[in-house]
Amino acid sequence: MRPGPVGAVQAKTNAPTESFFATLKTELELDKAKGTRSVTRGGVFEWIEVFYNRERRHSSLGYRSPQTFEEDWTRLN
């Protein structure tokens, strides 16, 4: 087997990252200027910590949020 072009491999490995940043930019409307860099940085942090890591449904958890998954697991065990 011959390895494919480097660009093709990078495209596959970058897909999750590209998806994350596309969602981040869309949800926070980062293309519109809204204050200082510090304000934007705080908004990004809050979005990641509050929504993306806690409330977003994850396919690997049966399309449940991490919080719901942990509550279900605790209840069953």
Image: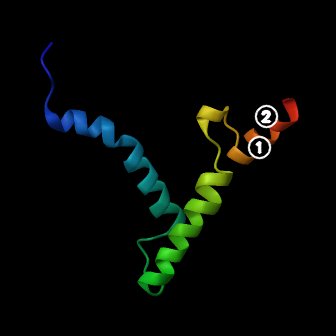
- Residue at (47%, 75%) from the top-left corner? 41
Instruction: Give the numbered dot on residue 33.
Output: none
Q: CA distance from mark 2 to mark 1?
A: 8 Å
**Residue 67, image x and y in percent?**
74, 47
Residue 55 sits above or below residue 16 on the image: below
* Camera-nearest residue between 63 and 68: 68
Total numbered labels: 2
> Which residue position is annotated with label 1?
68
**Residue 59, image x and y in percent?**
60, 35
- Residue at (42%, 82%) from the top-left corner? 37
* Camera-nearest residue between 18 and 67: 67
- Identify residue type, mark 2: Trp
- Residue at (58%, 64%) from the top-left corner? 47
Instruction: Give the numbered dot on residue 73.
Output: 2
- Residue at (15%, 22%) from the top-left corner? 3
Proximity of marks 2 and 1: CB atoms separated by less than 8 Å: no
- Residue 14, picture quadrant: top left
**Residue 62, image x and y in percent?**
67, 31
- Identify residue type, mark 1: Thr
**Residue 1, image x and y in percent?**
15, 12
